[in-house]
Amino acid sequence: MHTRDTIAAIATAAGSAGVGIVRLSGQHARAIGEAIAGRALTPRHAHHVRFRDGDTSIDDGLAVYFAAPASYTGEDVVELQAHGSPAVLSQLLDACFSRGARPARPGEFTERAFLEGRLDLAQAEAVADLIAASDVRAARAARRALDGEFSQRVDAIAAALLHVRVHCEAAIDFADEPLDTLGGDDMRRRIEQIDIDLAALLEAAERGRQLRDGLHAVIVGPPNAGKSSLLNALAGVERAIVTDIAGTTRDVLHETVRVEGVELLLADTAGLRDSTDAIEREGMRRAHVELARADLAIVVLDARTIEAGVAATRDAIANVPAVLWLANKCDLEDSNVPAGFVAVSARTGAGLNEVRRRLHALAVGPDADTAQGAFTARTRHVHALMKAREELSLARAQIAHEHLDLAAEQLRRAHDALGEITGRVRADDLLGHVFSSFCIGK
Ligand SMILES: Nc1nc2c(c(=O)[nH]1)N(C=O)[C@@H](CNc1ccc(C(=O)N[C@@H](CCC(=O)O)C(=O)O)cc1)CN2
Ligand SMILES: Nc1nc2c(ncn2[C@@H]2O[C@H](COP(=O)(O)OP(=O)(O)OP(=O)(O)O)[C@@H](O)[C@H]2O)c(=O)[nH]1
């Protein structure tokens, strides 16, 4: 089983630190580790040793040997825990290479853990999400995905689907008989329940994706309404150029802001209006591209011209899942704040706390209390779940027409879509895509 070559990498972050770790995994990990540590290594012991490359003393530190399969990767693993100096760690790494280890590719330790069956693919992705998590909530959600909360729900649905598939395949052999005598009702009921479970999981995965990626919010509105001023106010820095010239913002500006611990990706866009200026029109085209993939539109209108503002923005935001309406410049006289709008002033800061509160609520989702149960997920997972639902609904239609052979094929595809999430079914280039986004040493 353990015939893979031996890989080595610095497992800790680049730069100086108290401690840094070089990690080895593979069939020669133990021999290489023992050569550098200068002694035999007992599994699950921390040996205080002097690390040497031949006659050269590199550092003193701890050597830890994890014997296969009881290790992170499931292979023999040795950790060389030294002082966290880039110079020390690179010497240790070279010592590993000169003894036959090769540099690990990004994510290769975790890929091996996956290949050894210690993690499924969604859990392996959660490892990367956990490392990249930028706030406590995202870290907790990644931790839950790593603990298998997402995978277990996928597996449960896949198991129910398998049951229906078996039933359907069996019924094909009795195609002469009416489906009702073959338990067709039961099959339909089960499919209905699977669809309900899929829909719920899809919703959770979509929120999990937002947790991982941050909520994509786009600031839109007519020229001069104060969009850039709002971005600056929320970001707490003068990020965007603010002038009283309409059409100042041409390109899309991105800024990450944190509201009550939740990360939000804000995009400031060019004001929406009819324009003959080529640059401004291109800016508006980019604003529409941004809106097409937005989770949330923050519509900024001048509180003195709300009606015209609504008319100018309504079409652009028609397909955005959530909208927050702001009446800006409420510090000015003759400003008017209709129901459904939050009164703000990007200039004085009035209303900004309410905006943050609303943004936080939108980012956390409708059930902030149960967000405890949230896990991170990826676009890849969301798409696979949508595919499973589509195939399932096609299968349903075929069953209604008693085309069981066609239904069986559709059910198989729905099942495969779920299998791709956990990696039990593998598209050829899937693993490469997933693990190449990791950092080296993980
Ligand atoms: N020093 C160090 N810290 C680390 C890691 C590591 O590889 N090295 N990890 C790496 O990402 C994470 C912990 N993940 C790990 C998961 C499994 C095993 C492991 O050896 N499992 C064996 C033995 C279990 C046991 O005895 O309790 C097993 O599951 O069989 C080690 C680390 C975070 N901290
Ligand atoms: N009084 C007042 N003026 C504001 C407020 N917010 C923005 N302004 C002013 O309105 C003008 C336009 O502000 P911007 O933030 O550049 O507006 P914008 O919507 O980004 O404009 P474009 O880039 O042209 O689309 C500037 O002169 C700002 O100082 C506010 O809350 N109160």
Image (cartoon, rainbow, N blue to C red):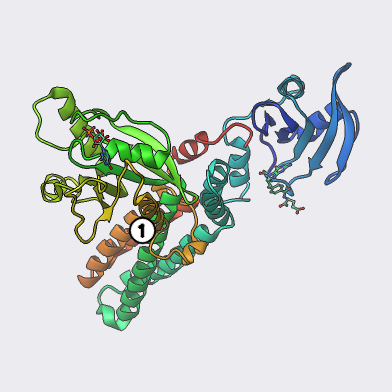
Nearest the viewer among 395 and 196 is 196
Q: Locate residue 100: give its quadrant.
A: top right
Q: Residue furthest bottom?
A: 181
**Quadrant of the snapshot with the C terminus:** top right
Left or right: 321 in relation to 233:
left
- Residue 330: horizontal and vertical position, in percent? 25, 49
Above or below, 179 relative to 316? below
The picture places residue 263, in percent across and down from the top left corner, at 45, 46
- Residue drawn at 39 percent across, 36 percent down: 255
Q: What residue is at 86 percent from the left and 18 percent from the top? A: 54
Q: Foreground residue, 237 or 65? A: 237
What residue sits 18% from the left and 53% below the top?
336
In this figure, which residue is indicated by the disc labeled 1?
Answer: 414
Q: Does any portion of residue 413 appear in the rendered image?
A: no
User: In the drawing, does residue 272 fall left or right of residue 212?
Assistant: left
Q: Residue at x 78, y 44 (%)?
A: 67
Q: Is residue 195 left or right of residue 340?
A: right
Name the quarter where the N terminus is drawn: top right
Is residue 428 toward the left or the right of residue 343 in the image?
A: right
| Residue 208 in view in this figure | yes
Instruction: Label 1: state its secondary structure.
Output: helix
Crowding at label 1, few (<14), some or many (≥20) Cα neighbours within 10 Å? Answer: many
Q: Which is nearer the eye, 438 or 333?
A: 333
Count of marks, rendered view = 1
Residue extending farthest to the front is: 333
- The x, y position of residue 363, in whole percent, is 40, 54
In the rendered image, residue 80, in percent from the top left (x then y), is placed at 78, 33
